[in-house]
Image (tube, coloured by chain):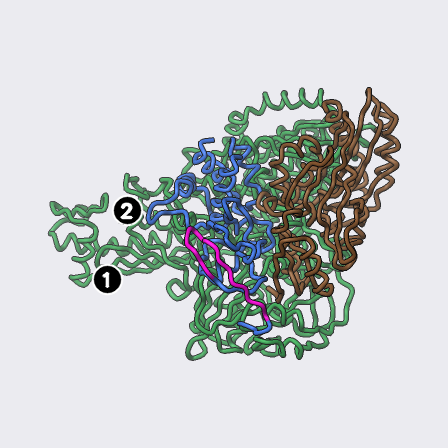
Chain colours: A green, B brown, C blue
Amino acid sequence: MSAATLSPRHGAVSSSVRHDSALKHTTGEAIYLDDQAGPPGMLHAALVTSPVAHGRLKGIDAAAALAMPGVVAMITAADIPGVNDVAPVGKDEPALATDKVEYLGHPVAIVVAATRDRAVHAAEAVRLNIEELPPVLTIEAALANESVVWPVMEMKRGDWAAAIAGAPQRLTGQVKVGGQEHFYLEGQIALAIPGEDGDMRLVASTQHPTEVQHIVSRLLGLPYNAVTTEVRRLGGGFGGKESQASLVAGLAALAARKTAKPVKLRLDRATDMRVTGKRHDFLARYEVGFDDEGRIRGLDILLASRAGWSADHSPPVMTRALCHIDNAYYLPATRARGFCCKTNTQSNTAFRGFGGPQGAAAIEAVVEHIARHLGRDPLAVRQLNYYGDGGRDVTPYGQRVFDNLLPRVTQEMLASSDWTARRAAIDAFNASSPVVKRGLGFMPLKFGVSFNLPTLNQGGALVHIYADGSIRLNHGGTEMGQGLHTKVAQVVADVFKVDLDRIKITATTTAEVPNTSATAASTGSDLNGMAAFAAANTIKERLIGFAAAHFGAALDQVVFQDNQVRAGNHVLDFGELAHLAWFHRISLSATGFYRTPDISWDPQSMTGEPFYYFSYGAAVAEVAIDTLTGEHKVLRADLLQDCGRSLNPAIDLGQIEGAFVQGMGWVTCEELWWDAQGRLRTDGPSTYKIPGSRDVPPIFNVRILENSPNPRPTIYRSKAIGEPPLLLAIAVWSALRDAVASLGDHRVPVSLDAPATPERVLFACEDMKRRAALR
Amino acid sequence: MMEAQYRAPGSVDEAVALMAGAGGKGRVLAGGTDLLVQMRAGMVAPGLIVDVKRIAEMTAISQIAGAWRVGAAVTGAEIHDHAGLKKAWPGVVEAINLIGSKQVQGRASAGGNLCNASPAADSVPALVAAGAIATVQGPNGRREVPVEQIPAGPGKTSLKPGEIVVSFTLPARPAGSGDAYLRLIPRTEMDIAVVGCGVNLTMKDGTCTAARVALGAVAPTVLLVEGAAKALVGSKLDDKAIEAAAAACRAACKPIDDKRGTIVYRTKIAGVLLKRAVAIAAERARSN
Amino acid sequence: MTDSSRQRVALALAINGRRHRVTIEPSTTLLDLLRDELGLFGTKKGCDMGACGACTVLVDGRRINACLALAVMQEGRDVQTIEGLAEGEALHPLQQAFVEHDALQCGYCTPGQIMSALGLIGEGRATDAAGIAEQMSGNLCRCGAHPNIVAAIAAYAGA
């Protein structure tokens, strides 16, 4: 790739141009799927779901429901013309339950009616005959029963057992981190529109239009070319609209097939939360051997996730968790095992970070355990274990950490956050404050970018230039607020050196760019930006060739700049060139394709070079806790995030701040709670708390690491930004532990699972007081 | 949503007649913030919605001989903006202002909060501690009921069929009085209390001469904790008396384990909140 | 679909300064009236339980959640929605501030944020950034754009 040159045009690469829909969002004119009247004759669907967590389905009595006014049809598994399976990775994950129900909320049937209210009421009137079976509800229960949805994974390096046994110090421990509801503000929704020849068109709020296409094809028994998926924008996704959106779209398609009418399925908030999967909660059990300074010699760690009733994305989530069990640290001898536990709960799925946060959280807890056991500053133990030189640069899965920015980001973060002085000030505050204690936490970050599975690392784009010089851009990525469309349009504008507003960004559709991957794993702009770059350059090469011949100039004398093209001594507007090229029968349309080079992964040995590069960062958080109630507040957070050479600093800053706030919710206030029957009781915003405006730290310093272009030739040397900064919020968890540790003079290990709710913090404080008194 | 008739009467008599005519299927709507949520969740399906926002008596705040009379449909936002009431009963006003988000406060009322009969309703412990009396009207006329007698369990009240809560009366009380309400929530203001504690004190020459203590969210209904009040009355609010009151609060708790907190946690917090609420109420009493 | 057994009520109200006369079922919420009957889709349905703020509108200048208000209760009232702010092509200065401060990501909460902010400024409560953050807590933003949202409101309010 040629080096990018930056220009003062509007919307140049690396400039902070606005999100493409900013204006429409502020006027309310941006159209989401539910914001349109729908095609004529459209019907509405509602789900009949299992009221129990586990049982044998013996019968469905819909007589009363079907007799209700406005009710058109009911669809059960028996009505599925193709294969009743919505599994994204494995198989045998029925869209509608057949002989058994496996969680409370399991879809059993779809009721279709003239209005949404009618459909919902009729669905409530459907009677299910279920013979209840005892449910498995927790990770612990599943581990005890060896109940898993996938074979156990094992990542090994060296003689871990000997390394631990021979280490001067050893510790064992356990830590749990909670799951997380996506809580996209726009709930799950899909509209299925039957066409001629049995074709089906889906308009869906999905991060993965191609998967929707595949799953609808599978359910309806159609070839892929008979199904089209389209999505203009999502009101938030965060991973929750990958496989889960395919389920919703698949159910809408089944209803549309049966009724031969367009059908919209929109889940209300409680149904959405009860039916769809979330971030996996994890349990980690570990034994670690280390030297007297805290340098890790060997680690044996078991990660167990709550997969829920089906595999869904649980295996790749576990793979990424295991690939982030090192986070910033060199682990010389390691065994890391992953159990995807089968439970009778929602099938957990992708969520921003995709296992990375859970893996990193576990090792951060281990490192702090070591530090407090030795009475050392956790920061010092962290730095001691960082990846470095002299052989200390290879991950447990065998990839070399070739681009290590950890020392640099740590140094910059400690300086900009005034770490040393604040550490002393906080210790002084704590010495004179009996009830309120403050804590200071640190989080270093290394996050691997690329889908673990090499196949998925491909992107496509389609660029047209019309004869007036206006440009239409389509690519495989979806826009869910992260500014992807804006960034990709910046790339195309930069290739042609035209203003951004010359480019029309269009709805993502499988009809224009096929065989795409999910907009996920932070790879949206890496993959689609490069694909669009390739497509635009294909056309540009044609234009250069044409202009050179037409104006009698050498190829290198054709230059695009500031909305104009110079060919030798001729200067013309970009639009004029487009018109001229059309007149002379030059093709002005091209596809572009990109596949990430130099990556590999062997799932059996769990080794390879799965990541094209790493993203780095660091965070410092300061908290105050009330040691009598456990209430706490984040007083200040300082973040430093590597974005390579940012394609759009304004958008990237928004991603960093937003990811941190979301991560803060995950480690503090967002708690999923199931009752003994397996009913999710936190099924709405009044019981499930996401961070609000008051929870954002009052002092919030967020910076992009400067002068750090990606050493890999990514699109304009940028780096992915979607997920990595979410992990920076682990600094808040670290700060809470530091505040609790102050009650034991920082010499007693802290036991504090996430989310660190007030209740958990209070009990951690009381536990700390008890143990400190015993010393 | 579902089929219901709607009426907006101009007087309490008319409202009561409508309720009587609805044969148990009537629901009073003030702000609607609870009723609409319940209707949508399928928890209630009223045949008749009686909108009481046009009834002057139910939407007014007035002072009679030192007592304050607050219409049951007065919104939290209106109470927040009422300087006189705020000065006299800061704890009650604060509690009512904890009902819902800023958007909800413009609509939610103490009457609705009480009749919704959630054990965690924020305004109720403060009203109970204040010794508030509810004026209730039904087919058989009016009666006055201490607020603590209205909730009968989660979602249940002791109101007879057709009865509606018209207003609350906060009694006149001597100089040297103060009240406070504190609650603990997992996060942010829209939460529902894990524990709520209302304290109302009268102090004379440094000694507590009268006290009422109420706890929310620790039992099926809001509790009036007489043991805690006894521990405070006659004391100078010394550590021993306050610890005894806190112990009485902990002993009174009969909470459940649920999504918002465990029994052990709620019980501990009840004691902590009591101490802190007493401190605030005492401070207010001193400056009144 | 209409059922003869269902009561229908005539309602007159102003929306964005324009008089509307509609006939609705009594249980219709203001949100459903705006979206389903009048085609004003700018006001979003986020939770439909009064707890996310995406449906915030102003009624006689006060902010409320349109999903928690019955339409029939708005007889004679003046309802303002996001569609009523811009004058032709010219954005309302608060909308402009949201654009300039990148105070949005997925955009789903944005109309509610803007209407809620107008409400709180009207209440005279936009004193400083901390106060604005406090007063905006009824409007959830899952993208976590709060810092820019607060900055945009502060810039407009001159706080």
2 or 1: mark nearer the eye = 2
The quarter of the displayed image where residue A266 is located? bottom right
Provide the chain ID for the residue under circle 2.
A
Answer yes or no: is residue B187 visible.
yes
Residue visible at 56% across and 65% down? C25
* Prevailing secondary structure class for the magenta stretch in the rendered image: strand
Q: What element carries label 1?
A: loop
- The residue that disc 1 covers is A587
Provide the chain ID for the residue under circle 1.
A
In magenta segment, residue A23: no
Q: In this view, does A295 lie above or below A64?
A: above
The quarter of the displayed image where residue A430 is located? top right
Q: Depth check: A708 or A666 in front?
A: A666
Q: Quadrant of the image for the C terminus of chain A?
A: top right
The quarter of the displayed image where residue A632 is located? top right
For residue B105, which numbered disc appears in the image? none
Q: Where is residue B251 in the image (x, y as percent from the top left)?
A: 87, 40
For residue A499, which numbered disc appears in the image? 2
Q: Position of residue B43 (x, y in %)?
A: 69, 61
Q: In this view, does A760 lie above or below B211?
A: below
The stretch in magenta equals: C6-21
Q: Position of residue A593 (x, y in %)?
A: 37, 57
Q: Depth check: A258 or C48 in front?
A: C48
Q: Going by the image, does B140 lie left or right of A587?
A: right
User: Which amino acid, mark 2?
Assistant: Asp
Q: Where is residue A427 in the image (x, y as percent from the top left)?
A: 67, 22
Q: In this view, does A196 lie above or below C46?
A: below
Label 1 near label 2: C-beta < 8 Å? Answer: no
Q: Going by the image, does A28 lie left or right of A150?
A: left
Q: Going by the image, does A353 lie left or right of B153?
A: left
Q: Earlier in the sequence, mark 2 or mark 1?
A: 2
